[in-house]
Structures are given as C-alpha cells and as structure tokens.
Amino acid sequence: MMKEIYYRKMLTIDDLALTPVYFILILMIAYFIRNLIVGNDEQIKKYFIPGLIFKLFGSIAVGMIYFFYYNGGDTTEYYNNALVMYGALSDDPVIFFKLLVYSYEDMDPSVFDYKGWLYFRRDPSSFFFGQITGFFSVFGFCVYTPTALLIAAFSYIGIWCLFMTFYRIYPDLHKEFAIAVLFIPSVIFWGSGILKDCFTLSSAGLCVYSFYNIFIARKRKIANLIILAMATFFCLKLKPYIIIALFPGLFFWAILIYRSRIESPFIKFLAGPVAIVLAGLAGYLAVNKLGNEFSKYSISGVLQTAEIYQDWHTILAEAGSASGYSLGTIDGSARSIITKIPAAINVTLFRPYIFEVRNPVMLLSAVESMFLLIFTIRILWKTGVRITLRAIFNNPTAFFCFFYALFFAFCVGFTAYNFGALVRYKIPCIPFYLAGLYILNKQTIIELSRNKKTNSPGNFSPETQLNS
C-alpha cells in the first residue's frame, strides 16, 4: 500500500480534472470575502482578485517547471512526504496525526512503517514544511496541483496584508505598491506553490502587518499579537534568518515614527542615536538567542557557514559552473565579511546580469534585476546620493524597507552558492526594496519640486500621510 502511494506520479490525470474545479472554487470564495477584507475601497479592491489569480497560476507554473524542466526537486519531495501522510490517514488517523505534529526524532515506533519513506530527516525546517504540505493535501485529496493551489491561496493572506500596510501609509502609491508586492514575476513564481518560500514570504508580510497595527496604528492589539506570534513561529521554524533581518528593521521603523511625532527638537535629536543603539542591540540579541536554538545562525556559526559557502563559490566559478558566482576570498573574519557587503548586496539585487544568463529560468531574474538597477540609478542620478540618503534617513517607512532589504540581501547574497538558489532565496526582500524605491521616488519628486519653487535646499520631512 505504501509503495503504491509513495511512487504515485506528481502530475496525473487527476490534476487535469481537479485543477479547474479548485481554481474556480478558490476564486468564488475570494470574490465572496473580498468586501469583508477590503471593504468599499474601490481604489484597491481591483487588485485583490488579479493578485490572487497571478499567485494561483504561479503555483501551477512551479509544479510544471519542477516536473518537466528540473525532473524533481524540493517541491516534489515535499509532495512525497504529503503522500506518505495522506496514505497514513486512510490507514489510521492517529498515525497521520503523529506524522503531522511530531518531529522526525520524536516519532514513536508506531509510525515506523511510514517514517522510513519520508524525506528531509536531517533538515527540521524542510521536514516541517513537508508536514504543512501534508495538512493541505487532505483538502486537495493529495493531488499535487489542488494542494499547491490551496497553499498559494492561503499564503496570499500575508501578501495582501503587506500590500495593505504600505497602502495605509501612502494611499497615493496604490498602483506602485501593487506592482511591488503583488505582481513581481519572480516573486509570484518562486513565492507560490509547494515551496518554503511561499510560506516564509507570507509570514514576513503578516509580521509587518501585525507589528504596524500593534506599535504604530495601535489597534486590535490582542488579535494582532496572536498574528505576530504565529507568523514569527512559522518564520522561525522554516527560515529563522528572516526574523534576524526583519525585526531590527521593524524596531527602527517604530522608533523613527515615534521620533517624527516628537515636538521637542532636543529630544528628537537624541531619539536618532537611541534608535540606532536599541535596534542594533535587538539584532545582536536576536542572532545570539537564535544561535542557542539554531547553531548555524549564531555569530560564530554565520562566520563558519559563510566561509564554507564562499569556498563553493570559488570552486564553481573556477570550474565554469553555469550558475555559480564568487565574491572573492573569505577567511572567516569579520573584516573580510564586511568588505564583501557591497558585492553581496549587488549580487542579490542586481544580478545575474543579462550576459550572465545561462538558462531560461535565469532570464526572468536577470530582466527583473536589470529593472531594479536602472530604477535605482535613475533615482540616484536625478536627486544625487546626498539628497537620496537624507530622504531615506528622514522617512521611517523608506528607512525600514531599505534597512531590511539590504540586510537580507547581504545575508542571502553572501551564503547562496549560485544564481539558481539565489533567485529563490532573495524573494522576501524584493517587494520591500521596490516599495522603498517607489516611496523614495515619490518623496524626492515632491521635495525637488518644492525646492525649485523656493530656490532653497530644503529639508526632507518624514511621511505626513501616516494614518493612525
């Protein structure tokens, strides 16, 4: 029985039969609840269904790429774990429950006949996502595409919440934020379907949404505390480094917004250095706290991991690997890591360049990277580096977006060994970086126009459209 279940093909005639049914059913439910979620705001209501449709198609595309192009990969192994759990459900629901909630090491002998068929035995985070896939597979009859559609639809909640958070702060940028959060092709593709990145991006969006509501908008604190706790839990279980990068930026965001509301110039002046110290301390404590639970995320673990991966960078580059890249020699010291920060950020946000493309999958990433590079250069060229930096530091939301995006870009650019892995790892920072660019572009246009009228250098003021 187990062998028959386990060796079931990933895409079958069942997918062709059930996919349209689930696709239409999800859209019908979404259309019904749209007014409950969005309300009567016609300005953004028009994005809700199209954003979901793109995400659903993205989940289907991921499965087809892995099945027909890669001939297997992470998503197929998550699905295989779901098959085992679904098979256990038909045999004994108690065994299914144990497979669903226990870690591989904690499973008792009663599940022995099943646990041997499971992947990711030594990778707790991937094993956990296999359990998540197993849960959703129950509602998709363990058929791959319906299961992927359900995961994509569920994860869309966090994506939409992130869009709504930015929109509440800058309502005039609704179109730009829709592009940045809902319609970036690589984020739609790699952030959908049966992949960890789908859940982690959604969890990051929920963290931002709930943090904003608790500490900045100050509403529905209990409900948002629960959302924040759950989203943080999923991030910690799947990709803890997202929390390491995200939470210092969130604390910066809140402190800088409180600073913008202070009327006393002296206290406002002191608040800046205090914010830097507190956010830096929070980041340091987060890394070391996580290091107690996940050794590779401790300070020493990061240095060791970085050195190992950078050795692979060099080997792949020298061997002429199709997608490998190198940042140069790394000796494991803090100084050598600091010197690689610009290159690591560059490789995450702006590479692969068009001339580095080696396969069709890389082409999509290269086109997006070129767009981000041109957009960034355009802003710097139009306003100048000094004015741009001043605008960032005086705008709490822009500062948060860039702080998190650049910190995260450094982390993944420094530890991913090739462009194929990087295109997936970097998606949690791309919406924030592009949203930051749109905010910065709007603010610099306004300020430059104001300066032309007054013929004075002027000062950038923090955002004035914040809704409390």
Image: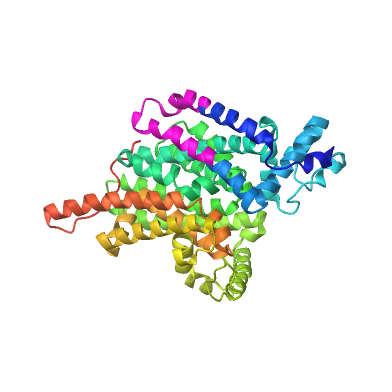
Q: Is residue 169 left or right of residue 148?
A: left
Quadrant of the image containing the N terminus: top right
Is 1 on the left or on the right of 278, as rendered? right
Looking at the image, which residue sits at the far left? 454
Q: What range is drawn magenta here?
A: 28-57
> Please, is residue 360 above or below residue 214 in the view?
below
Q: Main secondary structure of the magenta part?
A: helix
- Residue 162 at what x, y percent from top left? 45, 41
Image coordinates of residue 27 in percent, x first then y, are 51, 29
Examine the image and state in which quarter residue 213 appears: top left
Say whether residue 33 is magenta.
Answer: yes
Locate residue 272, reporting x and y percent: 36, 55
Instruction: Say whether residue 379 is left or right of residue 15.
Output: left
Question: Where is residue 379, by image quadrant?
Answer: bottom left
Q: Which residue occupies the foreground of this view, 436 or 156?
A: 156
In which quadrant of the rendered image does the C terminus lie? top left
Q: Residue at x 42, y 57 (%)?
A: 276
Question: Between residues 245 and 126, which one lies in front from this camera angle?
Answer: 126
Query: Residue 225's spot in the image, x, y percent?
Result: 52, 36
- Which residue is located at x 30 percent, y 55 percent? 391
Q: Is residue 451 above or below residue 177?
A: below
Who's the residue at 49% across and 58% down the image? 363
* Residue 173 covered by magenta stretch: no
